[in-house]
Image: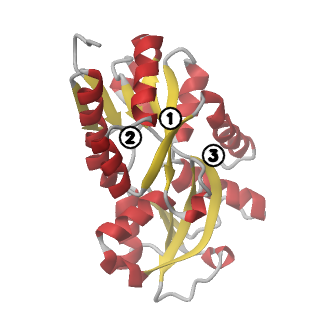
Amino acid sequence: MSQPNPLQLVSYLAPNMFGFYEAVGASLSQVLGIETQVVQSQYDPLEDPMMLEDRLDMAFICGLPFARRHRVISSQLQALVAPVMQASRYENRPIYFSDIIVNTQSNLQSFADLAGKTWCYNDPGSNSGYNLVRQRLIQGGYPSHFFRQVMQSGSHQRSIRWVIEGQADCSAIDSTVLEQELRDFPEFSPYLRVIESLGSCPMPPVVAAQRLGSSLINALRSALCEPDAELQAAMTRSHIQKYVPVQCEDYEELAIMYDAAVEAGYEAIA
């Protein structure tokens, strides 16, 4: 199978898994005979020129911006697969949670304790970092100005460090990102406590441009669901059990949640 130009794989997810995404690209090159290029985007996916100009071929993307983009142009991207993590909390399903973290030196024990505290988040388009917290406020009957101060960190990894360093009291972190960060930096563990987990939600998908055609798309899906030995080893190192097929419709619930929050007057958490 040939591709005239390198297959463009873009990651919009936390960079602490970028090495694994490079392994995915290398595996696809080996198995399908396609040159690949893997890049870490510095853009919000809904503002990325590569996304807007339909220049990316595959992407590792949060389910919420994917669902919102799919609503606008349903013919652009197709959901291929999503990972199933090894830990028992994921119940052998392609799901994840949003873990609300605080510093262990604080006396914060519950979500209600966060009233009037400083909250940091990665970006407002994030499902785990923002959307689920907004839904938690609505469900709990809390106002949008529940927190005393709100700060955008730019990444889950920076949010974790801000909580450890005391720059913020709390944050909501993608559970898989938090687990990987604690594997990479086990010295962080004594400083962090999870007081509540939100979700579950469908795991961020791997998506492909529909213009690649059904033959290549099916080959990409098969290569991920039936990994070669090198990719399987990389998955094991990253605590990924397997990839399973997913559909665009699996992520519609996230867009519905987003719309409901905006309609309820919670577009921004003040």
Residue 216 appears left or right of 195: left
Earlier residue among tags 2 and 1? 2
The residue drawn where x is 56% and y is 48% is 127
- Compared with 226, 2 (above or below) is above
Residue under numbered circle 3: 267
Residue 206 appears left or right of 9: right
- Compared with 180, 126 (above or below) is above
Give the image location of residue 41, x and y in percent: 31, 38
Instruction: Give the numbered dot on residue 81.
Output: 1
Closer to us: mark 1 or mark 3?
Answer: 1
Q: CA distance from mark 2 to mark 3?
A: 22 Å
Query: As shown in the figure, which amino acid type bears the numbered disc 2?
Result: Tyr
Asked if one can make out residue 174 in the rendered structure from this viewpoint, the answer is no
Q: Going by the picture, which residue comes out furthest to the front?
A: 229
The residue drawn where x is 34% and y is 23% is 56
Earlier residue among tags 2 and 3? 2
The quadrant in which residue 255 appears is: top right
Label 3 crowd (10 A; few <14 / some 14-19 / many >=20): some
The quadrant in which residue 227 appears is: top left
For the residue pair 146 and 261, the one nearer the viewer reads as 261
